[in-house]
Image (cartoon, rainbow, N blue to C red):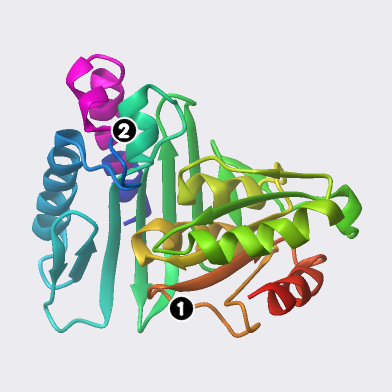
Amino acid sequence: MKKFIIELSEKAGKFLLENFRKDSDLFRLRGTTKEIVTKYDKMSDKMLVDSLSKKFPDYNILAEESGLKDKKSDFTWIVDSLDGSSNFAVGNPFFAVSIALVHHNKPILGVAYAPFLKELFVAEEGSGALLNGKAVHVSDVASLEKSYVVWCEATGGNLRMSRINANIQPKIKDLRKLGAGSLECAWVACGRADAFIVTQVEPWDATAGAMLVSEAGGKVTDFKGKAWKPVRSDAVFSNGKIHNKILEIIKKSD
């Protein structure tokens, strides 16, 4: 199963990379709204969903572009065919293919593939997290003052995130944004960032990433410190050591 999903992610990633910075029409998609959906999102989605449906005909599939295919199964594939669509559209290389499998609403497998960066992140329940086949772990940074934090306001959370950012930025080393949830989680998993804060994140943007962070030794919760579930919700992904300190700041800000 894992081998198949890795190969499928790489196939979709290759397709996206072949069309990256090749279509000048994508620049016309830039408007006043945050969300962008390109034809490449949809083409990649069809490729992924068709392949998963053929290989696992009895499993549910929840995909950002094509919605839910409900087979009443205990297993659900959660798919983002192009995480970081806006980045892709403007030629920013921070984009990825993200696929996760959940069983009874618990993530058990997660893959995030960033084709331009040639980085494949894989996590399987109980087996740790890997980057290009090598084990990765969250950072051991325990003080906010030394922490790099990435963030995103996912669904309608601009004002909330502005308040949180205003309170957290003076207390940390730096605040950053990549524009692709799966990669922001992956950065926490491999120690490039110490935490990722996001409001109302969709499951396709974070489920594979949650698996990566957890298997890399980190912690994933909602803003109240409860275990995160793959539904639209607020979330903090961290190395675990600064998690409670971040939750305290959020509580005072939100």
Chain part drawn in magenta: 9-30
Q: Is residue 126 visible?
A: no
Above or below, 42 against 226 in this view is above
Mark 1 neighbour density, 10 Å: few (under 14) some (14–19) many (20 or more): some
Q: Amino acid at mark 1?
A: Lys
**Residue 28 lies in the magenta-colored region:** yes
Q: Main secondary structure of the magenta part?
A: helix
| Image quarter hosting the C terminus | bottom right
Quadrant in which the N terminus is drawn? bottom left
Q: Nearer the viewer, residue 38 or 251?
A: 251
Given residues 223 and 44, the one toward you in this image is: 223
- Mark 2 highlights which residue? 13
Residue at image location 26% in from the left, 83% down from the top: 74
Which comes before the other along the chain, label 2 or label 1? 2
Q: Residue at x 84, y 45 (%)?
A: 173
Q: CA distance from mark 2 to mark 1?
A: 26 Å
Query: Marks 2 and 1: CB-CB under 8 Å?
Result: no
Q: Which mark is residue 229?
A: 1
In the image, residue 227 above or below residue 87 = below
Q: Looking at numbered disc 2 in the image, what kind of residue is underneath it?
A: Gly
Percent across and percent down for residue 35 are 30, 47
Quarter of the figure with residue 154:
bottom left
Q: Which mark is residue 67?
A: none
Q: Where residue 106 appears, x then y in whole percent?
A: 43, 78
Q: Check the image and report above or below for 170 versus 179.
A: below
Residue 138 falls in image quadrant = bottom right
- Residue 182 image point, x, y percent: 47, 50
Q: Is residue 200 left or right of residue 53?
A: right
